[in-house]
């Protein structure tokens, strides 16, 4: 694919314009002037006749008339007649009055930015006259609305006060929740401590019997499981009492066999009953 420009522009600046721009940067001349002069000499030697040839190339090959933009010279010369009038103390007022009334102040020299901006506008107008131009650049940003600083500071103070109040309420709520949680833990510890004897009693005398009764219910699957369990526990209680009595009698008999005195005492103690 080939590319053909629609418009061409050349920007020319002489040595004085370039030196003025370099001086405006505030850099000492001994730092930039030797390098600048060396480059300018090389440019003048190598491209002394290139500019007309380049313009002719665009005219002949591309049928385009280049637009030449010349950077304006810096306005360093004084206005003619101004120094003479100001150098005569006695005739300063007379000199000012002697100026023709039709004489207008000299026109201001346009800056480089203004010249480049005008050249860009001319190229745009020329291009728009040739064909339709579609601009795909994003639109310039809209100016930001003016903000009332005093009102914003007032709202900021109110928001800050509201945030502080909300933070204080949140802190109090959190402290109350932590206090309630600590009370629950203490109550649970106390409950565990006081219920320990009850748990030991149930685990020793109730849970094993009820567990065995439930196992029998699951194994037999009677029509009345509650009655079956109640009867089972009743029979189990009776058998437990008989076993406990037999165990006591056996212990007493063993003690009698080993100690006759204990036997007499046991018989005497049992006689009144």
Image (cartoon, helix red, strand yellow):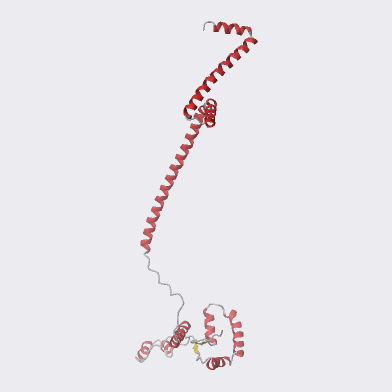
Rendered residue at 40%/50% (across/down): 166
- Give the percent coordinates (x, y) of residue 139: 43, 75
Residue at screen point 50% across, 34% down: 189
Whole-percent x and y of residue 33? 59, 82
**Foreground pick, 178 / 207:** 207
Residue at image point 44% right, 39% down: 180
| Extreme-front residue of the structure | 223
Quadrant that contains the N terminus: bottom right
Q: How many marks?
A: 0
Residue 203, quarter of the rendered image: top right
Q: Nearer the viewer, residue 176 or 43?
A: 176
Is 152 placed above or below 184 here? Answer: below
Identity of the residue drawn at 37% across and 55% down = 158
Q: Position of residue 239 (x, y in %)?
A: 54, 20
Q: Residue furthest right?
A: 258
In-front residue for pair 125/172: 125
| Residue 225 x, y percent position in the rendering | 48, 30
Q: Front-most of 155 and 246?
A: 246
């Amino acid at each position: 694919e080939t590319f053909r420009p629609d418009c061409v522009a050349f920007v020319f600046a002489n040595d004085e314009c370039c030196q003025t721009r370099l001086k405006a940067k505030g850099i000492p001349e001994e730092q930039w002037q030797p390098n600048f002069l060396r480059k300018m000499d090389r440019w003048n030697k190598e491209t002394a006749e290139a500019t007309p040839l380049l313009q002719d190339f665009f005219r002949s090959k591309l049928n385009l008339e280049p637009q030449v933009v010349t950077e304006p010279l810096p306005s360093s010369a004084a206005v003619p007649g101004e120094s003479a009038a100001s150098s005569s103390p006695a005739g300063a007022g007379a000199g000012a009055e002697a100026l023709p009334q039709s004489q207008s102040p000299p026109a201001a020299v346009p800056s480089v930015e203004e010249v480049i901006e005008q050249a860009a506008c001319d190229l745009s107008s020329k291009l728009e006259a040739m064909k339709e131009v579609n601009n795909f650049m994003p639109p310039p940003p809209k100016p930001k609305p003016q903000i009332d600083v005093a009102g914003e500071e007032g709202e900021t103070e109110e928001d800050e006060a509201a945030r502080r109040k909300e933070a204080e309420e949140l802190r109090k709520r959190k402290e109350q929740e932590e206090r309630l949680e600590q009370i629950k833990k203490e109550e649970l510890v106390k409950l565990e401590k006081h219920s320990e004897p009850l748990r030991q009693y149930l685990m020793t005398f109730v849970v094993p019997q009820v567990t065995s009764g439930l196992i029998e219910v699951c194994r037999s699957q009677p029509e009345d499981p509650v009655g079956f369990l109640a009867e089972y526990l009743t029979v189990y209680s009776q058998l437990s009492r008989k076993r406990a009595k037999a165990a006591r009698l056996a212990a007493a008999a063993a003690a009698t066999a080993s100690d006759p005195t204990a036997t007499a005492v046991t018989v005497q103690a049992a006689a009144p009953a």
